[in-house]
Image (cartoon, coloured by chain):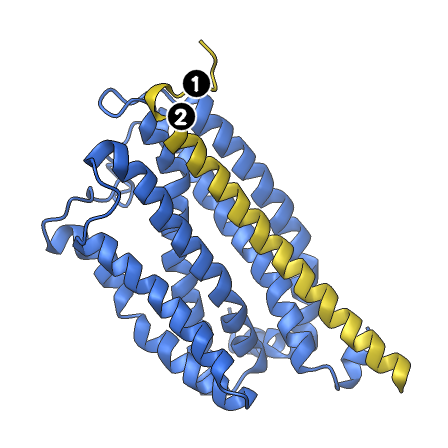
Amino acid sequence: MSLKAIYKYGSPPNFYRFAMKLEPWCFSLGVFLIVIGTIGGLFIAPKDYQMGDAYRIIYFHVPSAYLSMSAYAAMGFASTIGIVWRSTVAFSVAKSIAPFGALITALALITGMLWGKPMWGTAWVWDARLTSEFILLLLYLGYITLHASIKEQKRADRAASLVAILGIINLPIIHYSVVWWNTLHQASTISKIDAPSIVGEMLWPLLVMIIGYSLFFSAVICRGGSAEVLMREKRSKWVKEI
Amino acid sequence: MSIFDMGDYNFYVWGSVFLSFLILFLTYIDAIKKHKDVRRVIQNTKDSE
């Protein structure tokens, strides 16, 4: 993407129109893929020989854990663009990602606990993967709280962006925690694309769910981000003409 | 045996399914609501001018 295109979509009216056109497509395709992935994961994929049907939680746990990290990376990226270019759109997008990211991180933790209880005999242990994912939730909550506690919009954007940018350091820690430390949490299942440690019949619904969740996330950010842009630009001429 | 029966893990599997759909639904509804509220604020501002 050229710098010219970035500038074009960095303008609030262009971003608003683009996001509102993109949102229904992302939403429809996202919901469709989530339905297909759910049917595939719950009813078509074979039972695991060790975990039985309990492993089917993977179709909800892994996409939410994946999205919790990629949403934070997107928030950190948007915050960086916001700070460097003082972009209203980038700050709006970062702010709209935070509540979704916090909820999806909480979902990853809760589905992990629901999986851990029957498999490990405990819902929670302070191992490296679980603890670093919990820190990610605290980072999202820190961003939201800090933003809400500062009244002046520009100062709030800058302060919260610093939290988002500093927190990026937690992402490689989450990803490599199962490699760097001895954890109760299992190693990555699908990060090795050439040799995933999951059979094809079990893998496809998982990939479909991950793509579905990502498209759904894009739809929520298009809707939430454009609402935030409208709110910030409510006195602009282009908003009054909508 | 019903395809909905997850044996000993019914609570854990269906609990995960329910919570996941609930959170996805709530986040989308929240985004729609925010958008509607802002549009209403803008319309009110227009009407009062």
Q: Are marks 1 and 2 in contact (CB under 8 Å)?
A: yes
> Do the residues at pointers 1 and 2 share their chain?
yes
Residue at the top extreme, as displayed: B1
Secondary structure category for the residue under label 1? loop
Provide the chain ID for the residue under circle 2. Answer: B
- Write the residue at 44% across / 26% down: A42
Q: Residue B27: x, y in percent?
A: 56, 55
Instruction: Decide: few, some or many residues near mark 2? Use Cα within 10 Å; few <14, some 14-19, many ≥20.
Output: some
Q: Residue A69: x, y in percent?
A: 36, 58
- Write the residue at 22% across / 62% down: A173
> Gap in Å between the C-alphas at discs 1 and 2?
7 Å
Disc 1: which residue? B5
Q: Is residue B36 left or right of residue A80?
A: right
Q: Is residue A184 left or right of residue A134?
A: left
Relative vertical location of residue A202 with respect to residue A97 in this rendering, above or below: above
Secondary structure category for the residue under label 2? helix
Residue type indicated by callout 1: Asp
Image colour assigned to chain B = yellow
Disc 2: which residue? B10
**Residue B10: which quarter of the image?**
top left
Q: Which chain is blue?
A: A
Residue type indicated by callout 2: Asn
Is there any visible trace of residue A201 in the rendered image?
yes
**Residue A118: which quarter of the image?**
top left
